[in-house]
Amino acid sequence: MARPRTSNFDNQQSLLEKTRELLNTRLDNEDEALIAICYETGFAYHWVRKLGLGQFKNPSVNRVQFLYEYLTGTKLIVE
């Protein structure tokens, strides 16, 4: 039996959606804000831009979590 092409883990989850929302609110079409985020986090410019545009199907959870924590200024607590 063939495995379905799209699995449950490929669906957009709340951490990714919230991080993308926070990122886009911060950026608000300002290239300077994107450059500052990249400088302060160490992420590549194109990676952050693609994440904000929703061009990643399944980005690394560690990167998304790090960016979320940077944007919110709080640690993500998992219980």
Image: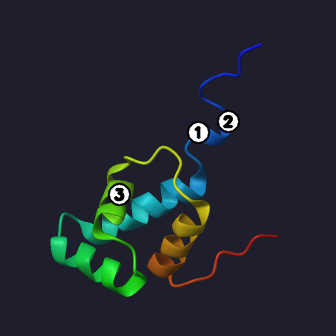
Q: Quadrant of residue 6?
A: top right
Disc 1 is placed on an element classified as: loop
Left or right of residue 29: residue 12: right
* Residue at 67%, 35% in the rendered image: 8
| SS at circle 3 | helix
Type of the residue with mark 2: Asn
- Residue for badge 1: 11
Compared with 46, 11 (above or below) is above
Name the amino acid, label 3: Gly
Q: Where residue 72 sits: x, y (%)?
A: 49, 78
Q: Nearer the viewer, residue 5 or 27?
A: 5
Quick one: quadrant of the C terminus? bottom right
User: Which numbered tag is attached to residue 74?
Assistant: none
Q: Secondary structure at mark 2?
A: helix
* Quadrant housing residue 74: bottom right
Q: Residue furthest top?
A: 1
Distance CA(mark 2)–CA(mark 1)? 6 Å
**Vertical comparison of 10 with 14: above or below:** above
Q: Residue 44, position in %: x, y?
A: 34, 71
Going from N to C along the chain, the mark reached first, 3 or 1, is 1
Where residue 21 appears, x then y in whole percent?
41, 59
Residue marked by disc 2:
8
Residue annotated with mark 3: 52
58 or 23, nearer to the observer: 58
* Label located before the other in sequence (2 or 3): 2
Towards the viewer: 49 or 71: 49
Graded by Cα atoms within 10 Å as few (under 14), some (14 to 19) or many (20 or more), the crowding at tag 2 reads few
Q: Quadrant of residue 7?
A: top right
Q: CA distance from mark 3 to mark 1?
A: 16 Å
